[in-house]
Image (spheres, rainbow, N blue to C red):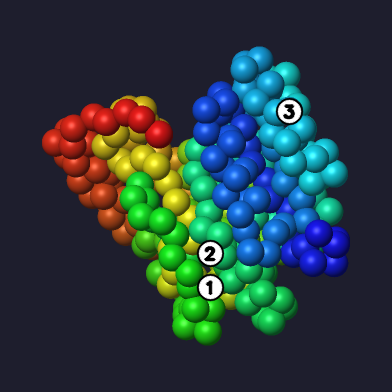
Amino acid sequence: MRKELYASVSVVIPCYQCAHTIFRAVESIVQQTLKPFEVILVDDGSDSETIESLYEVQNLYGSDWIKILESPENKGPSVARNKGWNYAVSSYVAFLDADDSWHPQKIEIQYLWMMEHPKIIFTGHHIRVKPVHRSHNIDISKVVSSRISNKSLLWSNCFSTPTVMIRADIDFKFDEAQFFAEDYLLWLKISFSTKEVYLFNEELAFIYKEPFGEAGLSQNLWLMEKGELIVYWKLYKSEDIALYHFAALWCYSMIKYFRRVLVSCITPSKGGL
């Protein structure tokens, strides 16, 4: 494929112990109707099996398209995503986790819309949990985008990381000191700065575990909650929100946390990918 037919998008995938899922993730990029310019696999201190899998992927699709950045130690997804973002050469950056995948029209729909709206630096879309049916073709003319207000985003994070596409040259990056809800903090910082973030009504990304309640996730519930509370505290300290707003958000967040704990307790643990 000629380079001018690629979207000016760099896909960044943080990779940690993902030998058994990385092929699925990259294959969903290969199947895109409009392919991104490059795919950056950022190792985050993985074992040799994962490293070997990353190079197998690169050998399969070419080192001119698949780039690998190795790290000797595990520093978390924020560091890995920022490392890939800084390395990227495209106009836009999209993020995919190594155990998730995309709808074949994800890049086509999101990138072309952003090209038509160059002042918008951030978009996302809906996500489907545990897809069981083959991806359907989407009529792009019927895709609807909705502006998400600061207030709405504060009360509910509607942007999952594998759904997001961001203009690469913005001043913001993931907070490397934060290990949970670091993506939510970035979305809010962008929203408060630009007041122009948009959500598409289509499910263009797929995750293979429930957000809460499954094995390997429920044990992190408090850490996830703590991360969200820290997000609100940082917004208060930076004077993006007032004290009364912080207090209200803190209470609401804790209510959601206890509900998630309850769901986790009554949901059967299920493994698998």
Measured from the top left, where is residue 152 in percent x and y?
A: 40, 69
Which badge, 2 or 3, comes first in the chain's sequence? Answer: 3
Tell me the residue at 50%/38% (across/down): 99
Asked if marks 1 and 2 touch (Cβ < 8 Å), the reply is yes
Q: Which mark is first along the chain, 1 or 3?
A: 3
Residue at point 68% right, 64% down?
34
The answer, for residue 106, to whether it is visible in the render is yes
Q: Please state the horizontal and vertical placement of residue 196, each as a whole percent of the image.
A: 58, 75
| Residue 64, image quadrant | top right
> In the structure shown, which secondary structural element does the residue marked by tag 3 occupy?
helix
Disc 3: which residue: 55
Which quadrant is the C terminus positioned in? top left
Which residue is pictured at 53% across the width and 64% down the height? 124
Instruction: Identify the residue position indicated by label 1 in the image.
Output: 198
Quadrant in which the N terminus is drawn: bottom right
Amino acid at pointer 1 = Tyr
Return the x and y of residue 249 as percentages of the image width and height.
35, 57
Query: What's the CA distance linking mark 1 and mark 2?
Result: 6 Å
Q: Name the residue under label 2.
A: 124
- Occupied quadrant, residue 97: top right
Three-letter residue code for mark 2: Gly
* Near-viewer residue (5 or 161): 5
Find residue 76 and report its horizontal and vertical position in percent: 59, 31
Of the image marks 1 and 2, the number of the one nearer the N terminus: 2
Please state if 90 lies on the left or on the right of 207 as rendered: right
The answer for how far apart the CA atoms under marks 2 and 3 are is 30 Å
Task: Identify which amino acid the numbered label 3 is placed on.
Answer: Tyr
Task: Name the residue at 51% across, 58% down.
Answer: 103
Closer to the camera in the image, 114 or 260? 114
